[in-house]
Image: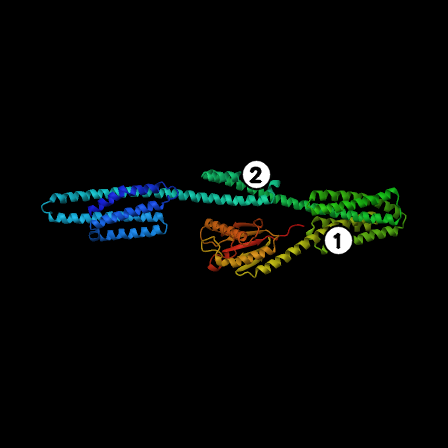
Amino acid sequence: MTIPHARVLAIAVCVFLVIPQFIGLNSCAGRSLPRVDIRTAGNSIVDARESIALARGEGSPEHAPQEFAQAESLLEEAQEAIRKGKNRDAADLAFQADVEAKIAMALAREVKAKRRAAVARESKLEIMWEAKTDELAAAKVRRAIAEKMAAEAQKEAERAKAWADKEIQRAKIELVIARVELEIDLAGRRKAFEYAEESYSEARSSLQAARSALAADDFQKAIIAAEEAARSAVQVKAKLETEAEESLRRRDRAVAAITRAEISLEGAKEAAAVIQYAEDMSPGNAGILVHHEEAQKTVKEARLALDAKEYDRARSLAEQARVSASSAQAVAEAKEREIRAREAREDVEANALDALAKAERTIAEAYTAGAGELSGDTYNQAQTALDRARQAMQEENLEEALSLARESISHSITALAMAEAKTEHKRRIEEIENNIMEEAGKIPDTSVRRANRGVVVSMGGVLFAQGSSQIRNDARGRLKMVAELLKKYPDYKIIIEGHTDSIGSEEANLKISGERAHNFLRYMVDHEGIPLERLSSVGYGESRPIAANINEAGRRQNRRVDIVILTAPVSP
């Protein structure tokens, strides 16, 4: 369809006079378009009204009704937009109304011109030639306008894409920084600056460098710094875990040392009782009782140090007490042997048999308590000493039998104490886990299982909208029940794990599972008041299914959030 040359000329005039200014505004906008105030929008409406009035005077309602009606409609929309405070929309609509009015006016003039030309067509062939020339010129103008507008649109699209790419990259880096910041904050709460000062300082320094680089739009430097901070944070976490394990080992050594000291005290007490019974209170024997009392006092101090988690000091005090008690015991036993040497052989044999029987009873109690599995080498040492004591008894080496029986008793008491402590702790943890599992089983669309780490509460059902990481409003009731459960057991850390089915790419599933786990964590903190230091989150994507992904039933089970309550037993 051929466009009348008058319409083309009108479009050309509007484009070259008005559009370049409008495009210029957009091209300088950068990341967003400039604001349009009400005065500018009002001026645009006034211009449009003037153009419509001129078009009406030229007879546009009759000769170009469609364009003229379009201009009036756009003007009404512009006036409605400015009343709503949408100044930019008002300016845009007024601009379009102005253009349509000028087009209508040009078309009306063209119709009038054609009517005049029709009267003199046969005598004015030059006018027809001129009209053809004008049409050719108009076609060239249309082409030039189209090329210019296409070029401007291409530039604007490129600028928009560049801006979008930049914001996407920024968001990715901000996510990395946020995750590292959370890890560093958790490490700081665990006093990482004491146990891993260098790595902790490096992590904080790298994190600050990442933030500064991001603020300066230096994305390459920001991601390098963020990754360096993440590596340092991993080192800090490893150091803290190592420190925690070492602390437990030091506590076990301190407990064992205190047990040995108490066993030595028990032996010293028995020996001292013999001296008192014999009423031999010579200066040397009186000194034994003094050393025994000092050893008792030192053991009490060791117990207090153990309660204060001063494990090395507790161990040192216990060793001092054991040495004192052992010295007192050794001297007392020597005195005892002198006293017993005056007694009959039967008495010595009775003492050895009594010690052997006591050793047998003690090791039997330790075995019944599970010391064979729970105390390690200590129980084996008790058994070996008992076997040797029996052999010495058969060979009538009574002193050696007595010593070995007491050694067996010492090891048996230590093994028994260790087994009872571990058994009681395990029983208490199992009782707590049973309570948690019973209460968690009452939450709808929830399954519960026991794992090595503790209790795993798997929440299925619809927690998130399809393809989204935002928690649905209708899931908040169930989350409230989960929060109430967690508040009943405030002494245990919580890991929020996100899981998906195998639909979609591994990368996308891993990302959305992590976002869902993090949003679940934030909901527990922000809406339910669970302390942040108790929580951590991680996304595993499709890597840890609990059912086959071959059908919807299996995939529905795999689309879940696991709340892991870390009740795993810790060595007492």
SS at badge 1 = helix
Residue 311, by quadrant, is top right
- Residue that badge 1 annotates: 363
Q: Earlier in the sequence, mark 2 or mark 1?
A: 2
Task: Look at label 2 and name its amino acid.
Answer: Ser
Rounded to the nearest angstrom, the CA distance separating label 2 from label 1 is 52 Å
SS at badge 2 = helix
Viewer-proximal residue, 12 or 432? 12
Could you tell whether 159 is left or right of 51 in the image?
A: right
Q: Residues within 10 Å of mark 2 (few under 14, many from 20)?
A: some
Residue 358 percent across, percent down from the top left: 79, 53
- Residue that badge 2 annotates: 201
Q: Residue at x 86, y 42 (%)?
A: 284
Label drawn at residue 140:
none
Viewer-proximal residue, 281 or 159? 159
Please state which of the two labelled residues, at mark 2 or mark 1, is closer to the viewer.
Answer: 2
